[in-house]
């Protein structure tokens, strides 16, 4: 999948690579907002977009407020999209509301659900309005350029980008992280998510709510997309392979056990091509930087799907990085102290959310998948005020980020 607004480069190895110079090279579409913010401040920035590098499509209220502060939220929301105002959790016969965004004193008391590609096209189109922004398509084989122990840019097929600072957002390029000798710290076990869609029938009630069904060892996320239901079955690592061995009926039965009312619709899944697997887990780098290079977003702290924080924390990373780096990049005075400060501002909020994600995963997914009684809801959800606290935590993260 590509972004039409970005200019693809030739991959013919017989053609000598072009060289471009920039103040900053950003690797990964998750860094599009950072590239836009830097270009707005007069920084020459080149974005290398990697195939299949998509950041997610649930934009939380805090991220919408950030976009609104630079005049983009209303135009973004002109794109056809869904809205989620509540998040509920069901275990057996009991249901509780985890988050109710309608209680927020915000212009955006909801989560906007915008297709990933449309979000990227929108941000790319805005960035291209600034003379300092350029872009290209890269590959997973992109390599760092080094001189005297320092990263001075990025080499992709057909192009070399020389830059004062390279910022990596793409978490799939783990080779770059290994090359820098950075050590990831595990925060929660990796899980597998099997995403699929089911038809939205005329008799279904339209909901502005995402539901989470939990059972021993499994979680089912259900989101109303208007014309269809988007569902994700979350399993411990390795469980999806066992389901595949047992066949599609075993997968249907696993999903139906958590959402019995969808049993008949599950028969519309004719083969495994209707199901998209995703593996995710929470880790973070002990150090997010080396001379000439900074890791942010998914590259610095891949996050569990619990709570949908990955995209929104990448946006907050971008805001803090733009606040601290715009002037030094323009003047060529970027120092290690700037990179250390970015990690200081963003690491603790990341650690808090990853700890909570790990706690929830441990509570649900570590239990045997077959038990004699349904899973009980965690006692924390019965505490007064927990819904308001969870609402604000999901909406804004542990600490708000604002464009300076």
Image (tube, grey):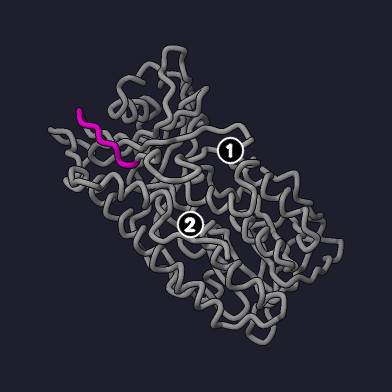
Q: CB under 8 Å between callouts 1 and 2?
A: no
Which percent across, then down, holds residue 166?
65, 70
Up/down of 44 relative to 164, above or below: above
The answer to whether residue 117 is visible is no
Q: Residue at x 62, y 56 (%)?
A: 33
Q: Residue furthest left?
A: 372
Q: Horizontal and vertical percent for residue 211?
A: 35, 33
Q: What is the span of residues highlighted in magenta in the rendered image?
A: 92-99
> What residue does disc 2 label?
313
Measuring from the top left, give residue 1's x and y in whole percent. 66, 42
Of all residues, the one furthest to the bottom in this rendering is 148
Q: How many neighbours does mark 1 have within 10 angstroms: few (below 14), some (14-19), or many (20 or more)?
A: some
Q: Residue beneath label 1, please?
A: 115
Identify the residue at horizontal 25%, vertical 52% (top origin). Answer: 362
Q: Quadrant of residue 256?
A: top left
Residue ID at (75%, 57%)? 135
In-front residue for pair 355/397? 397
């Amino acid at each position: 999948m590509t972004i039409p607004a970005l200019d693809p480069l030739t991959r013919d190895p017989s053609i000598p690579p072009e060289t471009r110079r920039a103040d900053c090279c950003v690797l990964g579409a998750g860094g599009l907002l950072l590239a836009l913010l830097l270009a707005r401040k007069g920084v020459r920035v080149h974005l290398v977009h990697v195939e299949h590098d998509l950041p997610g499509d649930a934009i939380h209220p805090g991220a919408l407020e950030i976009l609104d502060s630079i005049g983009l939220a209303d135009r973004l929301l002109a794109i056809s999209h869904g809205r989620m105002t509540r998040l509920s959790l069901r275990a057996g016969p009991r249901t509780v509301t985890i988050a109710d965004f309608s209680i927020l004193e915000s212009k955006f008391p909801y989560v906007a659900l915008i297709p990933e590609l449309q979000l990227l096209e929108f941000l790319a189109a805005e960035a291209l309005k600034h003379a300092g922004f350029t872009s290209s398509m890269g590959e997973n084989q992109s390599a760092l350029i080094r001189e005297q122990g320092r990263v001075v840019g990025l080499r992709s097929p057909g192009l070399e980008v020389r830059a004062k600072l390279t910022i990596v957002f793409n978490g799939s390029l783990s080779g770059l992280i290994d090359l820098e000798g950075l050590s990831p710290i595990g925060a929660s076990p990796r899980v597998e998510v099997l995403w699929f869609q089911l038809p939205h029938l005329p008799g279904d009630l339209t909901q502005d709510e995402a539901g989470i069904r939990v059972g021993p060892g499994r979680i089912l996320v259900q989101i109303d997309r208007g014309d269809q239901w988007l569902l994700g079955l979350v399993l411990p690592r390795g469980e999806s392979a066992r389901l595949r061995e047992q066949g599609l009926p075993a997968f249907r039965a696993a999903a139906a056990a958590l959402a019995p009312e969808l049993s008949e619709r599950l028969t519309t899944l004719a083969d495994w091509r209707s199901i998209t697997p995703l593996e995710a887990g929470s880790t973070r780098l002990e150090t997010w930087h080396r001379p000439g290079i900074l890791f942010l977003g998914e590259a610095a702290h891949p996050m569990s799907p619990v709570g949908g924080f990955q995209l929104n924390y990448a946006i907050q990373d971008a805001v803090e990085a733009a606040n601290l780096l715009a002037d030094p990049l323009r003047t060529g005075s970027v120092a290690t102290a700037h990179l250390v400060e970015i990690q200081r501002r963003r690491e603790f909020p990341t650690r808090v959310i990853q700890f909570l994600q790990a706690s929830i995963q441990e509570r649900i997914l570590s239990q045997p998948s077959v038990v004699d009684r349904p899973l009980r809801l965690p006692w924390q959800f019965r505490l007064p005020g927990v819904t308001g606290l969870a609402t604000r935590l999901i909406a804004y993260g542990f600490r708000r980020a604002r464009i300076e």
